[in-house]
Image (spheres, rainbow, N blue to C red):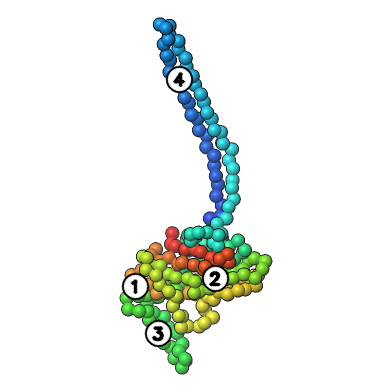
Amino acid sequence: MSGKDSNVSTFNRRTVVGATGTLTIAGLAGCTGGEEDEQNQEQEVEDDTSGESTEETTEYANKRDDLLELPFGEEAQTDHGIVANAEIRDFEESYWYEGASGTEREAEPDSGNQFVFIDFYAENQGDEEGRLPPERTMDLLVENEQFDRELYRGDDSEVYEGDDVLPGVRREGLILFQAPEDAETEDVVLVLNDGHLDEGMLVRWVSE
């Protein structure tokens, strides 16, 4: 995923616009001692909040009780400067890699499954050492069926690896999963559930 621009999330801004409401209460006329005494009473209660106010909030991925849901390709962030993003690269029936003897070998998924390649990156944009989410904290959901991360048998340098890193350090690479052979992009959800809060992240990436 090298060379891709970060798509900074737009989920961190909310605008609250006030409304103006008017409530009117009318009294009914009454008759007393044969003499008509009509009394009309009108009370108007006006709540004028027509001035627009803007409240800026940020939904940090480590300050929520529930998983923060974002579309694939949109960054999640924590309040201490860790950002992360995920995108679906491809679905493959198999892939080739170089074996120990130097010969090309084919890796195949379990029967009835296919491989799903996820491109993932994380970066420490904070001022102190921080934790990039480990790959073991991610799972793939396909129609409520959970799939763990798969061992990628190709070049290790292609694989994403999270760790405690210094400010400015970025890690990127692929994460491999299996999914049913008929699964498509819109069926796939990547769940990052790093319970190492307040330093971890709780995110679901979904297809739009």
Task: Characterize the local packing of mark 1: few (<14), some (14-19) or many (20 or more) Cα atoms within 10 angstroms.
Answer: some
Per the image, label 2 sits on a secondary structure element best described as: loop
Per the image, label 3 sits on a secondary structure element best described as: strand
Disc number placed over residue 27 in the picture, else none = 4
Q: Residue 44: x and y, percent? A: 52, 26
Vertical placement of 126 versus 149: above or below?
A: above
Q: Residue 50: x and y, percent? A: 56, 36
- Say what amino acid the circle numbered 2 marks: Pro
Between 71 and 161, the one nearer to me in the picture: 161
Residue tagged 1: 181
Disc 4 to disc 3, how far (Cα)?
86 Å
Task: Characterize the local packing of mark 4: few (<14), some (14-19) or many (20 or more) Cα atoms within 10 angstroms.
Answer: few
Residue 38 in view of the camera:
yes
Q: Residue 1: x and y, percent? A: 53, 72
Disc number placed over residue 133 in the picture, else none = 2
Vertical placement of 154 versus 57: above or below?
A: below
Which circle's residue, 3 or 2, is located before the other in the chain?
Answer: 3
